[in-house]
Image: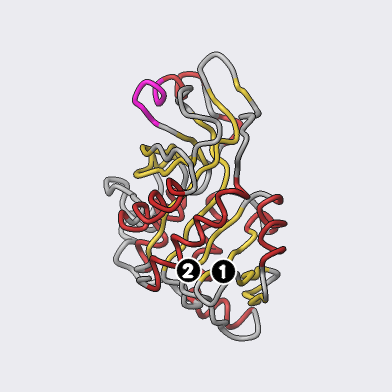
Amino acid sequence: MIPHFGDKYDADALFSPADAVAAQGDGLPDAPPAVLLGYQTELTDAVREESNDRVEIVRGQHIELLSEAVGYVPVHESGIGAPVTATVAENVIAAGAEAVAMLGGGAALQPDIAPDAAVLPTDAIRDEGVSHHYLPPEEPVTPTASLVDELDASLSRAGFDTPRGTTWTTSAMYRETVPEVERYRDEGVVTLCMESAALWAVSRYRGADAATVHEVGDYLTSEEWVPEADADRGLTDMLSPTVEAMERHVTGG
């Protein structure tokens, strides 16, 4: 059972993210109020075509500025999965981010989800370790409802289907077993990813808003893995409406 030390939830950490970033870098930077996390190189390339500046965080992590209100972190340059996502989220929240959202690929568990849908998870099966160090296992981990609604409205206006539902977050990419896939498909779980539960748990613990937008990267069924979704529109098309939603959320505009 994670965590092994069960009384940790009311205990203080030895040092904070702000302490770590300030000590390991050039002091605590100023992050914009909304930060988008990216996991695919094609999205990062698109961001860099639009970015006008960057903020260095720590140890190579940086925020590409898309506006005064919204920045983007290429998380994939530091790694993948829940621990890296949680660390980046902690760092940008410590630096002033009020809302953090991930825009990345997820595997669809429902075959009727369109390949070019923008899936908006609304709760998570916590099958990774990070979230359990922030919130007890019996507590549901969810995104910020108002931010999900903002993203839904913006992506819908841009012509995307926006199915909602549960996402399964696991750190064991190569141990997504047939019985699990079958069960979660039958329960209506919409996507699988490695990050959402961790991101949402960190953000809730730190008092920041959070959400996830999933591009359908592949399909999982109990019979086969379909590694390419063959979509006409993808992450780069979702970027502008996602940024617009994040900006509205933090500015009230």
Rendered-image quadrant of the C terminus: bottom left
Identified at 65% across, 80% down, the residue is: 25
Q: Which amino acid type corresponds to the residue marked 2 in the rendered image?
A: Ala
CA distance separating discs 2 and 1:
6 Å
- Residue highlighted by disc 1: 71
Residue furthest bottom as drawn: 27
Residue 187 magenta-highlighted: yes
The vertical placement of 116 against 187, above or below, is: below
Q: Foreground residue, 79 or 221?
A: 221
Residue contact between numbered discs 2 and 1, judged by CB atoms under 8 Å: yes
Q: Foreground residue, 4 or 74?
A: 74
- Report whether 229 appears left or right of 19: right
The vertical placement of 79 against 165, above or below, is: below
The vertical placement of 101 against 118, above or below, is: below
- Residue highlighted by disc 2: 34
Q: Which amino acid type corresponds to the residue marked 1 in the rendered image?
A: Gly
Please give the range of residues in magenta.
183-189
